[in-house]
Image (cartoon, rainbow, N blue to C red):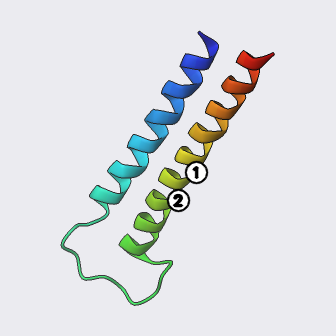
Amino acid sequence: MKTLLKVIIVIIIIIGGVLIIIVGKKPIPEPECIVCGPNLVRILGIAEVILGLGALVIQGNLVEKQRNF
């Protein structure tokens, strides 16, 4: 049950990152700097998705090791 809760939390994080990326694509003229406006939001959304996927893989590996013992 605890493992299922962790997996659900990670999936919610991944969905949140995807939503950040989608919302960050508004038809607003983009500023030239990377850390301004929509560029920062898009980068943070991508980072959230990548970290969420990494956490899901690590969680899967830990569950598999626990089953082997």
* Label 2 packing within 10 angstroms: few (<14), some (14-19), many (20+): some
The residue lying at 41 percent from left, 44 percent from top is: 16
Furthest residue in direction bottom, as rendered: 32
Residue type at numbered disc 2 = Ala
Picture coordinates of residue 15 (x, y %)? 39, 41
Tags 1 and 2 touching, CB below 8 Å: yes
The image shows residue 68, relative to residue 19, as above or below, that is above
Q: Secondary structure at mark 2?
A: helix
Q: Identify the residue at horizontal 59%, vertical 25% (top origin).
A: 6
63 or 35: nearer the viewer: 63
Distance from disc 1 to disc 2, alpha carbons, whole Å, reads: 6 Å
Q: Position of residue 22 (x, y in %)?
A: 28, 57
What is the secondary structure assignment of the residue under circle 1?
A: helix
The spot of residue 4 in percent (x, y) is: 55, 17
In the picture, which quadrant includes the C terminus?
A: top right
Relative to 27, 50 lies left or right: right
Residue name at image x 35 percent, y 59 percent: 21
Question: Label 2, on which residue?
Answer: 47
